[in-house]
Amino acid sequence: MASALINVPAKAGRGDVIEIKTLMSHIMESGFRRTAAGEIVPRDIITSFTCRYNGTEIFRADLFPAISANPFISFFTVAKESGKLEFEWVGDNGFASTASASITVE
Amino acid sequence: MQHPPNSSRRQFLGLAGGAAVLGALPVVIVRPAEATPAMLASAIQTVTGGAAVRIGKVKLDIPPLVENGNTVPMTVSVASPMTANEYVKSIHVFNEKNPQPNIGNFHIGPWAGRAQVSTRIRLADSQKVVAIARLSDDSFWSASADVIVTLAACTEEVN
């Protein structure tokens, strides 16, 4: 079970621009490294990250091997209504993980 | 017996020095135009579809000197009012010398409020990092930064 860290303000004023920070635990094996025996270590990365705000996609990222291990991504959105932010990571070898956070907008 | 090795060493040093000068010159002269290797150019072409990329509006925050290329903090921000009519559609980040030219594509919209994305990236060598933003009118703007990397990512052996 992969673990995620999400940082979303619990409360925000309507119309405020809020920062969302996410960190997903993942090796992000680039597929370009070799073992001491010279064999290539197969690629194992997260390829896609999506954030939905009350069901509407507000942020999507395509990730490549050049993203560091345990990918950290931060971005902004306008706090328009109270509700739920859902996060989804999809990657190689059937990797899929989700997380969510709720926000109260006043 | 001393003479031949000495002279060949001198020749070698002379050649190496000359090569270094030759190598350095084009970098200095060509940089403003197309100093970027073909892979980077074609990766950018894939995103822009051949549209002109202008320099400006984009700010790429990345340390100029990093010790560890495995995790380099990077922030891209774009000067945009982020209104319904004028906003940033996506931000794309590329590199010059990693095995693969892409770093990440980030899709945002007018609801973001602020066109800014941060992440941590890998750099396999001292190189140029390029950020390109696609605006709502489908124009492309870019910024680039040179980063010196002391310990490279990607190349080490796995134990």
Image: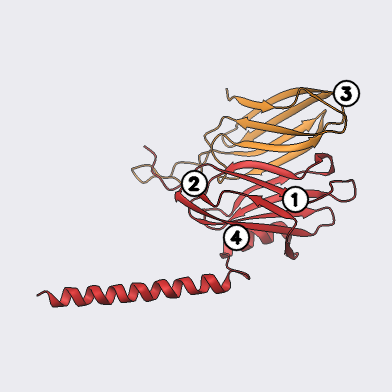
Disc 4 with disc 1 on a shared chain: yes
**Secondary-structure class at tag 3:** loop
Chain assignment, label 2: B
Chain B palette colour = red
- Pointer 1 local density, CA inside 10 Å: few below 14, some 14–19, many at least 20: many
Three-letter code, disc 3? Glu
**Secondary-structure class at tag 4:** helix
Single out the mark in the foreground, 3 or 2. Answer: 3
Question: Which residue is drawn at the image coordinates 67% and 57% (left, top)?
Answer: B143
The residue identified by callout 2 is B69
Q: Which mark is residue B40?
A: 4
Question: What kind of colouring is applied to the model shown?
Answer: by chain
Q: Position of residue A65 (x, y in %)?
A: 55, 45
**Secondary-structure class at tag 1:** strand
Q: Quadrant of the C terminus of chain B?
A: top left
Instruction: Look at the picture and state if B130 lies above or below A63.
Output: below
The residue identified by callout 1 is B78
Compute the Cα span from label 3 to label 2.
42 Å
